[in-house]
Image: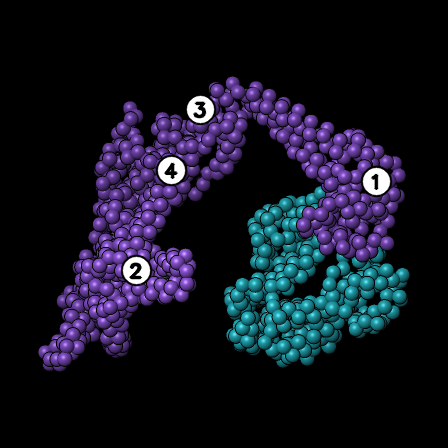
Chain colours: A purple, B cyan
């Protein structure tokens, strides 16, 4: 349960080695890059003026950001073309990437292959094009299938022209309504939803006029083949035969390439992997800064990866690469480090819901574990049922395994489990309370106890989150909030005394003067938090702004504190209410089931009821619990304004080996 | 649908925005100006256009820049109004952009046809892609009308322009005609998205506008372009308030202009033809004025309807048209008295 510690790493290398160095960094997949110029200009950047570094140091004032973004679309087109031709699956393989190679030289090889077989590929394309064309003829001719037209004679007419065209229905209507004025025979031969296909016949002398009219109807001509005789269906048969011939010759042409395939398939496969890597490298370059001879690149790397990465790179590049490793500045100045959460498997899925609120800042405590435990607790308490819980657990397992949605499925499994446990405590199976005994309590029979217990749970959780907030303030060395803030010691003290007094009054006692004095004391501390903190820190200025507006704001702050303390606590009553609601909903379905009259109807209603309860109430409770977490608890101690850790990685390389370079001898 | 609920909010917004329209006094003052910069300065110092002119050096402004700035106002106002609508209505209100978008595409086509470079004009064609799924940068890269058509692939316009690609018919005239026809076909579909009273009002309103445009089109086609009656008819808008297909057909097949005038006399649109010298010059303005007053009447009659929104957009457009009419009359040194006659708004 923690936020992964990061180190700031710097890579300063010779320009000519840039591609190779970046390639290794991408393959390593643990660098979260930051803009190099921003890093160099940040206050905590330092580089020791040793002999090794001196050359690089000289370049510092003249650095430029990398701007020549290389376009790989041409390479990509050729490579995917070859892959299609050879029938190669797109797959990134590590073995091709670990070799030592120069991308440009390598890609020339590919271009040569492409050149060599271009003649054949172009012929294949040409054949495929004519096949396409013939297919279109066939689809056009099929409109004329039912008519006894001799295509040869239609095409060879001297005084008439025959055409097939497509117009929209709207326009066809216009044509029809004005048919008496159109100097052409128009025959509807097909209907295709929005469009109509018509055949037209016009005297050659009137063709121009007819063309103008048809133009105004925005037609699409449908091409008919030249030089074929016979009825439409005969021409179609003939064309189909020709297509088969063409397809055969395409196959033959492809077969003639087979020895190329044997020879070059592996090269093309390699090319694909290398292209993917090169694209990532190019992306990474946009964060680099370039000098005359040296390039600079910076980024965050998780602490446990630093050593290995450093050793690898040093062994590969030696003196041509300077590696800087810096701790992250405690002060919080400089570039914000990214946050990588690390949690045990039990709590990991809940990271999803925490991230929905926000990523913890680097110097903030990761609330996932707290969230996971309290969330399971709240959900189970509101939705306690052995049967329904197990259904959810099962659904979660299916999602995890079948749909491989580990996060959401995982959450469902855990919530289902918690619901099952509470089911035993409440003695509820699929809503029925008659099957097993309640280990602790039956909610419906003890309404007041449930509601009071819920509020009590709320008090515990609020106290816990306030303590969490105090711990966070300690990490951030924030005296003002930690000691005197609403979510600091003063707030906690006030809250505890307040709760104590409320309980006492509820039990028939009265509030003691000491309690009142304490509460007033804590409120005064809260109002004076800024001047007190500044005094303790030994600062000269007591207020950040003018004292008047400070007290104005804090005055309202006190009222707000009083209100929100109460409402936050009462808000937890919903935990008890939903537990009751859960039973109540079932009772409703049970009653309707009994009214059905038949056994089958009764069972059907109970099943329907359970489906609705799991679906609808499950969702409502899921949201309500989330609401409690986000509003009542997170707002006390969790900011969530961090940046997510996104290392540069090669996509498609599913399991990046932790140590890819060990295998290469240098 | 709770029309009054929706319109209560949007109409309040419209009333507030109408407060920014130019007043009669503004028009009078503008007509007294002697140069475009002077006019621009007046707008900057005295009117709501100040907001759009604040970063502009009015001394150096050209007519084209001014036009671009004002078109931005249409966008910013419409965007504000769209916000108030939901679902089908949102689509409908968005479709009010369509007219301007098509005007921009046509403008672009003309520029490409004349061989202008994209950097000359890409700035000023802001409406492209505002309603449709067009990707402006693709369109700006086109070097010919054919390119332009292919670059529209995937957009709402493509089905209309696609047929032009076959048989080398991609000329400018057809391209423009096809887009216009496409516009009205799309508008016709949009009407289906509104309900009840709104639908009826739109039918009347759009039908009347279609009538006016149809008469203008047939008249011009007959008088200036000598188009075939069949062509004329095919290019008319296929809906109308008063002019049914049969009436349109009769107009298209009128043997000569005299016969045409006679036929128009029997419709409610005879006012367009005064048979004097100024008839052609003022026809556009007569149509616009008729629309303007029709809108005003509808606006009063149907307070809680979509017509309020339409009115606002059209009035804004007319205001901008009038500003440019004033610009032109300044440049051509037309006296204020004469210039007034070219304006849509009477004051």
Residue B241 visible at all: yes
Q: Are the two marked residues, 4 and 3, in contact with CB atoms closer than 8 angstroms?
A: no
Q: Quadrant of the C terminus of chain A?
A: top left
Report the Cα–Cα distance between label 4 and label 1: 61 Å
Crowding at label 4, few (<14), some or many (≥20) Cα neighbours within 10 Å? Answer: many
> Dot 3 corresponds to which residue?
A266
Report the Cα–Cα distance between label 4 and label 3: 20 Å
Q: Secondary structure at mark 2?
A: loop
> Dot 4 corresponds to which residue?
A650
Report the Cα–Cα distance between label 3 and label 2: 65 Å
Quarter of the image for residue A653 reads top left
Q: Same chain, marks 4 and 3?
A: yes
Q: Point out residue A329 in the picture as x, y percentages from the top left corner.
A: 23, 51
Q: Are the two marked residues, 1 and 3, in contact with CB atoms closer than 8 angstroms?
A: no
> Which label was assigned to residue A432?
2
Residue A114 horizontal side relative to residue A205, left or right? left
Report the Cα–Cα distance between label 1 and label 3: 56 Å
In this view, the mark in front (4 or 1): 1
Mark before the other along the chain sequence, 4 or 3: 3
Q: Are the two marked residues, 4 and 1, in contact with CB atoms closer than 8 angstroms?
A: no
Q: Chain of mark 2?
A: A
> Dot 1 corresponds to which residue?
A161
Q: Point out residue A428 in the picture as x, y percentages from the top left corner.
A: 27, 59
Q: Chain of mark 1?
A: A
Residue B285 horizontal side relative to residue A153, left or right? left
Residue occupying image coordinates x 64% and y 64%: B191
> Which label was assigned to residue B57?
none
């Amino acid at each position: 349960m923690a936020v992964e510690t990061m180190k700031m790493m710097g890579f300063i290398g010779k320009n000519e080695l840039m591609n190779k160095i970046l390639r290794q960094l991408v393959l390593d997949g643990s660098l979260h890059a930051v803009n190099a110029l921003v890093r160099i200009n940040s206050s905590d950047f330092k580089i020791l003026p040793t002999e090794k570094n001196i050359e690089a140091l000289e370049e510092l004032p003249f650095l430029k950001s990398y701007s020549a973004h290389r376009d790989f679309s041409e390479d990509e087109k050729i490579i995917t073309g070859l892959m299609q031709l050879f029938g190669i699956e797109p797959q990134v393989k590590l073995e091709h990437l670990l070799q030592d190679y120069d991308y440009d030289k390598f890609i020339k090889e590919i271009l040569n292959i492409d050149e060599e077989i271009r003649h054949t590929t172009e012929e294949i394309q040409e054949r495929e094009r004519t096949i396409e064309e013939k297919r279109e003829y066939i689809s056009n001719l099929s409109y004329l299938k039912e008519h006894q037209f001799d295509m040869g004679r239609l095409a060879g007419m001297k005084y008439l022209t025959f055409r097939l065209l497509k117009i929209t229905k709207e326009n066809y209507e216009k044509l029809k309504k004005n048919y008496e004025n159109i100097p052409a025979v128009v025959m509807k031969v097909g209907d295709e939803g929005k469009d109509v296909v018509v055949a037209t016949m016009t005297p050659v002398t009137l063709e121009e006029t007819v063309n103008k009219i048809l133009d105004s109807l925005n037609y699409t001509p449908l091409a008919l083949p030249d030089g074929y005789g016979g009825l439409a269906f005969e021409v179609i048969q003939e064309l189909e035969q020709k297509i088969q011939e063409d397809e055969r010759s395409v196959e033959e042409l492809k077969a003639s390439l087979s020895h190329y395939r044997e020879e070059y398939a592996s090269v093309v496969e390699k090319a694909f992997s290398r292209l993917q890597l090169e694209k990532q490298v190019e992306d990474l370059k946009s964060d680099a800064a370039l000098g005359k001879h040296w390039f600079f690149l910076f980024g965050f790397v998780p602490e446990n990866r630093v050593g290995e990465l450093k050793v690898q790179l040093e062994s590969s590049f030696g003196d041509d690469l300077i590696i800087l490793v810096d701790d992250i500045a405690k002060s919080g100045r400089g570039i914000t480090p990214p946050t990588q959460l690390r949690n045990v498997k039990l709590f990991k899925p809940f990271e999803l819901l925490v991230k929905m609120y926000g990523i913890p800042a680097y110097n903030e405590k990761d609330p996932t574990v707290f969230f996971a435990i309290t969330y399971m607790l709240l959900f189970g308490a509101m939705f306690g049922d052995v049967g329904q819980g197990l259904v959810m657990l099962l659904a979660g397992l299916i999602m995890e395994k079948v749909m491989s949605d580990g996060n959401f499925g995982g959450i469902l499994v855990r919530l289902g489990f918690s619901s099952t446990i509470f089911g035993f405590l409440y003695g509820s199976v699929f809503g029925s309370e008659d099957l097993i005994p309640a280990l602790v309590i039956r909610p419906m029979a003890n309404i007041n106890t449930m509601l009071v217990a819920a509020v009590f749970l709320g008090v515990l959780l609020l106290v816990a989150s306030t303590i969490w907030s105090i711990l966070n303030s300690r990490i951030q060395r924030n005296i003002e909030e930690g000691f005197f803030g609403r979510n600091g010691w003063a707030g906690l003290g006030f809250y505890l005394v307040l709760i104590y007094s409320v309980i006492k009054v509820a039990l028939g006692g009265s509030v003691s003067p000491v309690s009142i004095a304490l509460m007033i004391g804590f409120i005064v501390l809260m109002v004076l938090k800024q001047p007190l903190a500044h005094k303790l820190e030994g600062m000269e200025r007591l207020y950040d702004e003018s004292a008047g507006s400070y007290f104005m704001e804090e005055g309202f702050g006190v009222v707000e504190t009083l209100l929100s303390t109460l409402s936050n606590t009462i808000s937890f009553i919903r935990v008890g209410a939903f537990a009751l609601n859960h039973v109540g909903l079932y009772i409703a379905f049970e009653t309707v089931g009994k009214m059905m009259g038949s056994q089958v109807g009764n069972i059907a209603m109970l099943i329907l009821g359970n489906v609705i309860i799991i679906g609808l109430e499950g969702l409502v409770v899921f949201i309500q619990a989330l609401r409690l977490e986000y509003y009542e608890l997170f707002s006390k101690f969790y900011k969530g304004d961090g940046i997510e850790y996104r290392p540069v990685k090669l996509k498609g390389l599913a399991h990046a080996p932790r140590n890819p370079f060990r295998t290469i001898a240098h | 649908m709770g029309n009054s609920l929706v319109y209560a909010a949007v109409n309040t917004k419209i009333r507030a925005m109408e407060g920014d329209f130019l007043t009669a006094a503004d028009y009078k003052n503008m007509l007294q100006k002697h140069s475009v910069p002077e006019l621009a300065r007046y707008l900057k110092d005295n009117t709501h256009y100040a907001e759009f002119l604040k970063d502009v050096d009015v001394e150096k402004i050209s007519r084209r820049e001014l036009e671009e700035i004002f078109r931005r106002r249409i966008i910013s106002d419409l965007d504000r109004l769209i916000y108030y609508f939901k679902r089908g209505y949102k689509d409908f209100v968005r479709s009010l952009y369509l007219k301007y978008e098509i005007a921009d595409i046509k403008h672009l086509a003309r520029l490409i046809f004349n061989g202008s470079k994209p950097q000359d004009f890409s700035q000023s064609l802001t409406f492209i892609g505002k309603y449709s799924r067009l990707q402006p940068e693709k369109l700006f890269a086109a070097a010919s009308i054919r390119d332009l058509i292919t670059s529209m692939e995937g957009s709402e316009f493509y089905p209309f322009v696609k047929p032009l690609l076959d048989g080398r018919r991609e000329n400018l005239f057809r391209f423009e005609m096809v887009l216009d026809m496409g516009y009205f076909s799309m508008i016709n579909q949009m009407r289906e998205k509104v309900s009840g009273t709104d639908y009826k009002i739109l039918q009347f309103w759009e039908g009347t506008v279609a009538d006016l445009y149809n008469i203008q089109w047939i008249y011009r086609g007959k008088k200036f372009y000598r188009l075939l009656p069949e062509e004329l008819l095919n290019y008319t808008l296929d809906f109308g308030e008063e002019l049914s297909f049969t009436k349109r057909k009769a107009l298209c097949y009128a043997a000569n202009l005299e016969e045409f005038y006679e036929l128009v006399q029997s419709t409610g649109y005879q006012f367009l033809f005064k048979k004097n010298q100024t008839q052609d010059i003022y026809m556009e303005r007569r149509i616009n004025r008729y629309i303007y007053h029709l809108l005003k009447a509808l606006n009063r009659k149907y307070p809680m309807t979509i017509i309020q929104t339409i009115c606002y957009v059209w009035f804004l457009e007319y205001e901008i048209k009038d500003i440019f009419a004033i610009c032109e009359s300044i440049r051509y040194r037309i006296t204020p008295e004469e210039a007034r006659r070219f304006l849509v708004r009477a004051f």
